[in-house]
Amino acid sequence: MLVKAAISSGNGDFSIEEVTILPPENDEVLVKMMAAGLCHTDYDSLYWGRSVILGHEGAGIVLAIGPDVTSVQPGDQVILNWAIPCGKCFQCQEQNQHICENNSPVVAGDVLPDGEVSKGHARLKSTTFKNKGIERSFNIGTLSTHTIVKEQAVIKYQTEIPFSSASIIGCGVMTGYGSAVNTAKVTPGSTVAVIGTGGVGLNVIQGAKVSGAAKIVAIDINKARLEMAKQFGATHFVLAQQSDKGLKEATIKVKEIVGKRGADFAFECTAIPELGAAPLGMIRNAGTAVQVSGIEQEVTIDMQLFEWDKIYINPLYGKCRPQIDFPKILELYSKGDLLLDEMITSTYKFEKLQQAFDDMLSGKNAKGVIIFEP
């Protein structure tokens, strides 16, 4: 079947093109995409140096399944999960399904030979562009009207929720919520500082609220985002200045709020390398700092910031266990304890993908979502 997909050139550009998808085989699932969330990782993938089908957040409807698939049937609603567990390797057995040793996500520089079956991908040639198999970003390629993925990449759900809201669970929501709940294990009555209140930061705030934190301090240079943070559970607010190097002045204000010894937990959610060490300065001795945003550049840290007994964690995807965590998130949503509909600032038709990227990069959106035609 011919479908449309957003394909990167590898050097910063993309175009929406027709691709051919073959029927699913073995443990493959064909999904009609209904909505796809957009985040900075999608923009980064434009510069991977090779063509890929973009997108790694999404929700849709199963159209067809291979003969070995048992967990879903045609017609099922599913959320897509990009960190696909094999369930058998050392890390999966250790409950670290997000860093599966067999199906780790494909990243920049990790090129798959044409036709190779590797790292959680459905057959590369199950989707072809210009008569060649094409890679799907992070194994799923959700910025496409249809996609074919491994069975382990889809999580069935029956919750009453718009596809747009369901689509963002599989990265931005899970990363923020999971960093607070699964990674840091925020405790009832604790104090929390959250640096950056974009989509991921708002979900850290929600995770801290669900965990029973007493004070949740939101820090941002964008006043409008701080206003949004209040809706999602922040109790105190620090409007930082662009000129505040390392957020030293903001740190003083945080300690005025939580107490001079510092916060119990602090989270960096900006992806700005210069702020990689900032949460260490905001926590008390034996507190926990979490680098949520995935900084991958070299960061220089004054080791005195670690004094004393401070913990610094650099987790991936909120330690996601999709079959466990997605249902929990959906249950919290159903109870009104986790806001998802309110997080979506704008929705876009597929052909307006460039506008969605532009709005994201300008800081306009907490979360933008592409809505595909019914």
Image (spheres, grey):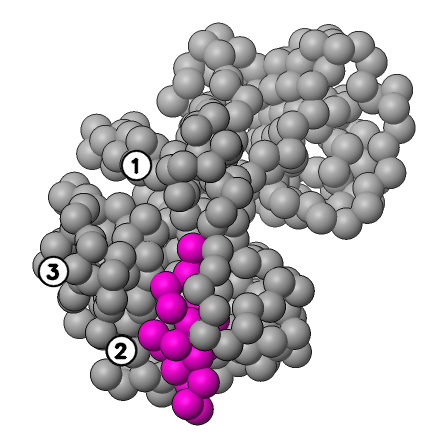
Query: Is residue 247 among what the camera can see?
Result: no
Mark 3 lies on a secondary structure that is loop
Mark drawn on residue 22: 2
Q: Are marks 1 and 3 in contact (CB under 8 Å)?
A: no
Amino acid carrying label 2: it is: Leu
Front of the two marks 1 and 2: 2
Q: Which residue is mark 3?
A: 74
> Disc 1 versus disc 3: distance between alpha carbons?
19 Å
The secondary element bearing badge 2 is classed as: loop
Q: Is residue 167 magenta?
A: no
Where residue 246 appears, x then y in whole percent? Answer: 81, 36
Q: Residues within 10 Å of mark 1 (few under 14, many from 20)?
A: few
Magenta segment boundaries in residue numbering: 120-136
305 on left or right of 143: right
The Cα atoms of the two marked residues, 1 and 2, are separated by 27 Å
Q: Residue at x 55, y 68 (%)?
A: 112
Q: Is the residue 23 above or below the residue 304 in the image?
A: below
Q: Which residue is mark 1?
A: 323
